[in-house]
Image (cartoon, coloured by chain):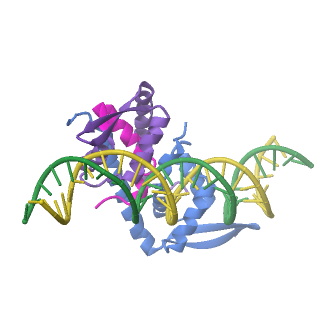
Chain colours: A purple, B blue, C yellow, D green
Amino acid sequence: MNYSTELLKGTLKTIVLKLLADNKKMYGYEITQRVKELTLNKIQITEGALYPTLHSLEADGFVTTETEFIGKRVRKYYSLSPTGKTKTKEKVSELANFMETMKFLLDIKTKTT
Amino acid sequence: MNYSTELLKGTLKTIVLKLLADNKKMYGYEITQRVKELTLNKIQITEGALYPTLHSLEADGFVTTETEFIGKRVRKYYSLSPTGKTKTKEKVSELANFMETMKFLLDIKTKTT
DNA sequence: GTCAAATACATTAGATTCTTATGTAACTTT
DNA sequence: AAAGTTACATAAGAATCTAATGTATTTGAC
């Protein structure tokens, strides 16, 4: 079973940044496969979501790219820039903090009324 | 400091359902204030986001409404329907599960390459 | 050796879901 | 009496995703 899609919203950029922080350089397809594998098929990043995200990270200067040829096929590697590394830390800790807040909210049992 | 807004995406419906499950009946404005107070101002639900959500939950049969007059002012209370209660459990456990997955993803340190 | 599946990039139309702005109206506090 | 709070609501626009589609190469199975 995979999650109802709306949950991924807002977290995709953070996931991508974090993977790049841990793996130095990755290419798009690799990212989708890694996430799928790490989450036991629970999170499937579609290409329609990933590529615009990567391009936007590049446009914002958070990642840099280098192309490599595997036979005749292009492979585009993405790496974090220095600002990207800072951004990653921010995004990851913000998400961690948000999840703590959500966990608290979801456990509320007491009525204040 | 409050979260960069995109994080809330996809979680609002679950938050609302959970609050209704814990409080039997609530009205819109009350929900915004409760969330704000419970999260120490970190999560601010805007009315433009809340009311459409409530109306959609009502359209889907997950909540029922009753209006009350406080003086001349209308107050619209929302309560969970039986299907709404089931739905709440589903959504809450799905979100909890998703957060576990995310936590795991964000802690990845090892390189498999 | 050929055909399907996998690898690898990408874009686009459409859906969803939020923000920001706006509107109305009553009640409360200064 | 004015400003702030309570309480409902809608609408335009932004952001971000899905699903569909496209191109092309490479690998694996039969």
Magenta stretch: residue A86 in it? Answer: no
Q: Residue at x 37, y 64 (%)?
A: B90
Quarter placement of the C terminus of chain B: top left
Say whether residue A45 is left or right of residue B61: left
Q: Residue at x 51, y 45 (%)?
A: B39
Give percent across and percent down for residue D30. Answer: 7, 65
Q: What residue do we see at 63% from left, 68% from top?
A: B76
Residue B24 in view here: no
Magenta part, dominant SS: helix
The total number of labels drawn is 0
| Whole-percent x, y for residue B111 in the image | 22, 34
Q: Give the residue furthest to the top.
A: A82
Q: Is residue A6 magenta?
A: yes
Residue A99 location, x and y as percent? 41, 45
The quadrant the N terminus of chain B occupies is top right
Residue A90 placement (x, y as % from top left): 44, 32
Specify start and end residues of the magenta stretch as a single range: A1-26
Along the viewing direction, whichever of A36 and A100 lies nearer the viewer: A36
**Residue A14 occupies which quadrant of the picture?**
top left
* Quarter assignment of residue A87: top left
**Toward the viewer: B17 or B99?**
B99
Residue B32 in view (yes/no):
yes
Q: Is residue B32 left or right of residue A10?
A: right
Establish if A65 lies above or below B100.
above
Q: Residue at x 38, y 37 (%)?
A: A17
Q: Is residue C27 above or below residue A56?
A: below
Q: Is residue A87 left or right of residue B78?
A: left
